[in-house]
Image (cartoon, helix red, strand yellow):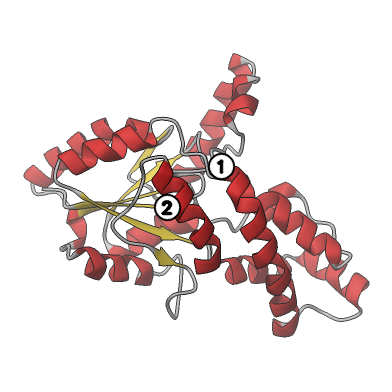
Amino acid sequence: MLKAAVFDWAGTVIDHGSQAPMGVFVKTFKQFGVDITVAEARGPMGMAKRDHIKTLMAVPRIAQAWQKAQGAAPDEAAIDRVYEIFVPMNVEAVTDYCTMIEGAVPAINRMRARGMKIGSTTGYTRSIMAKVLPLAAAQGYSPDNLVCGGDLAEARPSAMMMYRTFLDLGVWPAHTVVKVDDTGVGIGEGLNAGCWTVGVAVSGNAFGLNPAETAALTPAEFAQMRAAAYADLRRTGAHYVIDSVADMDAVLDDIEGRLARGERP
């Protein structure tokens, strides 16, 4: 009954811990004399990158720091200046974070074996994805479409990128599609489109660590961080939360059963 799964990129299928953009946000703001933390940078993750910058600059502490450093409150021109610096820096950095998340490719291949199409949406720009796509393909992942945050009039959490994906893949109705994401705005994108939604916790933005950093945690530390990441994604309204896309099979089986009983998202 399920016709497609639509995946985010960083933190969902590549870049365990969604780390590529974080350092770039910090370095970009630093160039303007404004210090932001990695935790602050993570807050709007999943948004189109200009929207992400705009949201950061609306944070009162960051807005005050910007005014002190630049002599004026942040406005649309200021957002454009930061964005113009951020994008090329992210294009250069992203290639160091393009490793597929463990188990993602086999899980996606099993979905194709079910007869499902594989879609993708992202907050990354086309210029960033031009670097990512061939690196992912070399590792066995080539989705059936790509919609970027800047492609349409509105990005996440609106449903527009999902609507474009339905058209690209030729799938409908929305309840036959599963949206998989590691951020609240990505889950919102799926909910607003009428899809089943699955949050990925340990591989994604909410957890925020790469595999080596994760392995270095004590069992108690891991359990505490995992519980917090699950709670974050549940608060967004995700129908399911799992550690990573490697755990999708049981979720898809459950959704198929719910659809067979006439349930809808």
Which mark, residue 42? none
Which mark, residue 206? 1
Q: Nearer the viewer, residue 8 or 66?
A: 8
Above or below, 104 against 35 in this view is: above
Q: Residues within 10 Å of mark 1 (few under 14, many from 20)?
A: many
Q: Nearer the viewer, residue 45 or 116?
A: 116
Q: Amino acid at mark 1?
A: Ala
Residue at point 18%, 48% (across, down)? 116
Residue at point 65%, 20% (across, down)? 216
Q: Amino acid at mark 2?
A: Asp
Q: Position of residue 67 (x, y in %)?
A: 87, 74
Above or below, 165 against 249 in this view is: below
**Residue 9 shows up from this direction:** no
Numbered disc in front, either 1 or 2: 2
Of callouts 1 and 2, the N-terminal one = 2
**Residue 241 shows up from this direction:** yes
Q: Is residue 146 left or right of residue 1?
A: right
Residue at point 38%, 36% (across, down)? 104
Q: Position of residue 254 (x, y in %)?
A: 20, 36
Q: Give me the C-alpha separation between circle 1 and circle 2.
A: 14 Å
Q: Name the element at disc 1.
A: loop
Q: Name the element at disc 2.
A: loop
Q: Nearer the viewer, residue 213 or 191?
A: 213
Q: Is residue 133 left or right of residue 80?
A: left
Which mark, residue 8? 2
Label 1 close to label 2 by CB (< 8 Å): no
Q: Position of residue 260 (x, y in %)?
A: 7, 43
Above or below, 33 against 136 in this view is: below
Q: Position of residue 195 (x, y in %)?
A: 27, 56
Q: Residues within 10 Å of mark 2 (few under 14, many from 20)?
A: many
